[in-house]
Amino acid sequence: MRCFKHHSTDAVAVCACCGRALCPDCVQTPTATRIVCSSDCANALARDAKAVQLLLDKSAQSAKASAFYCYLTAALSAGASIAAWFMLPSPFLIYFTAACALVLFAAGFWYRRVARKHGLDA
Ligand SMILES: [Zn+2]
Ligand SMILES: [Zn+2]
């Protein structure tokens, strides 16, 4: 593979942004983890990284919100199963609401772990 600019020189790297082949002279950031051909490409990559980070933050926040709603509905289901225990002579309803509470609590726990993984303290 030859450099995209210097056709007689062998390429040693490829731009991480636009995919052009680069010779040692054309590599703009030899010390960076991702090699780029120009400052334009470096900026584009930095912008992408920022967008991804923003997306991750957002998903962590929504996971946090989901965890909260799971705990809330789990608490409501637990309350309903206790109410059913006292007010309804139906074991099925009691077991059903109790099972709902357990599943929702587990889901809330899982969402919380997802939020933690993304670096947000839930
Ligand atoms: Zn490039
Ligand atoms: Zn070159």
Image (cartoon, grey):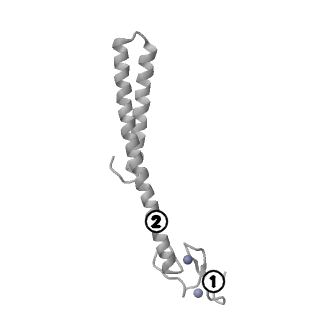
Cα–Cα gap, marks 2 and 1: 25 Å
User: Taking 79 as reference, is 104 above or below it?
Assistant: below
Which of 23/66 is in front? 66
Q: Residue at x 38, y 49 (%)?
A: 61
Q: 34 left or right of 78?
A: right
Q: Earlier in the sequence, mark 2 or mark 1?
A: 1
In which quarter of the view is residue 93 placed?
A: top left
State the residue lying farthest toward the top. 89
Please tell me whether mark 2 sits on a helix, a strand or a loop: helix
* Residue hosting label 2: 49
Image location (x, y in percent) of residue 22: 58, 82
Three-letter amino acid code at the position of disc 2: Ala
Which of 72/107 is in front? 72
Three-letter amino acid code at the position of disc 1: Phe
Asked if residue 62 shows in the view, the reply is yes
Image location (x, y in percent) of residue 72: 35, 33
Q: Are marks 2 and 1 in contact (CB under 8 Å)?
A: no
* Residue hosting label 1: 4
